[in-house]
Amino acid sequence: MLKENLNIVQQKISDAKGRSGRENETVTLVAVSKTEPLRYIEELLSYGVRDFGENKAQEFRDKYNLLNSGINWHFIGHLQKNKIKYVVGKAALIHSIDSTDIAEAVNKKAADLGVSQSILLEVNTSGEESKFGIRNEKDLFEIASFCKNASNLNLLGLMTMAPFTKDEAPIRKSFSALREMKEKLNAQGFGLTELSMGMTNDYEIAVEEGATILRVGTAIFGERDYTKPWNQK
Ligand SMILES: *Cc1c(COP(=O)(O)O)cnc(C)c1O
């Protein structure tokens, strides 16, 4: 089932790239493996998937400790200060930095470890109260400036989650807003290259709007089962 699902997702990505004249650009598919057992991750590895995403710090740490060779682990969830130690230096990319406070703590931990931590800033482009992320351009500029000057952070771009709806217009609007924010920051010398946007509900639209990283779970693994922990499945 994983193989067929993966093929379908990859085909749809490739079609969306074609439609938007992006055939020669790299779009990285992160398989969001939260709640999923290791054997599914191993199966996807055998099909050439190298990027996996987790949103809980302990689950991230435990899976990383069991399986890390040849994998880029992405941390995509909300990061609390006391759990930074589980993620920094292990994540190929942290997608969810949303305050100077957390950026400062990540920078400090990265400095302690003697590593440069690649990060994205999470922006709330939907205005939904329930979502995390930076809420206005002034804050975004301030946090981005802090990260750019931080010795052990490597700020690569922006991340967002679109509203969950069947209606295409607000989704497209979220994604184009993120792209415009990246362009504005780049006009001020930030040199950002990455846009992490697009999930199962909307990854084709995200490709059309310029995503360079997609975070797809359900379309690859099927519906998530929250009744048992990942290591008891
Ligand atoms: C769970 C999650 C995803 C993947 O969601 P699907 O709808 O299953 O594709 C993507 N991004 C974040 C931040 C998530 O928490």
Image (cartoon, helix red, strand yellow):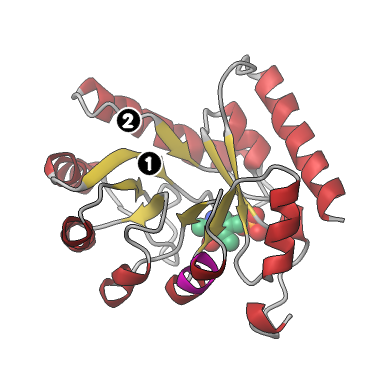
> Could you tell me which residue is drawn at 51 percent across and 33 percent down?
212
Residue at 74% x, 36% y is 10
* Tag 1 near tag 2, CB within 8 Å: yes
The image shows residue 200 at horizontal and vertical percentages of 68, 50
Asked whether mark 2 lies closer than 8 Å to ligand 1, one says: no
- Total number of numbered discs in the rendering: 2
Extreme front residue here?
A: 69
In the displayed structure image, the side of residue 17 where residue 159 appears, left or right: left
What residue lies at 60% left-to-right and 18% top-to-bottom?
22
Chain part drawn in magenta: 60-64
Residue under numbered circle 1: 158
Percent position of residue 124, x then y: 39, 52
Q: Which mark is residue 192?
A: 2
- Image side of residue 61 versus residue 140, left or right: right
Mark 2 packing: few (<14 Cα in 10 Å), some, or many (20+)? some
Image quarter where the C terminus lies is: bottom right
**Is residue 122 on the magenta stretch?**
no
Q: Where 215 sits versus 173, above or below?
A: below
Location of residue 69 (image quadrant): bottom right
Residue drawn at the location 21% of the way across and 63% of the way down: 109
Identify the secondary structure beneath mark 2. loop
What is the magenta segment's predominant secondary structure? helix
Q: Is residue 193 above or below residue 106?
A: above
What element does badge 1 sit on? strand
Q: Is residue 26 left or right of residue 103?
A: right
Q: Position of residue 154 (x, y in %)?
A: 26, 41
Residue 173's disc is none
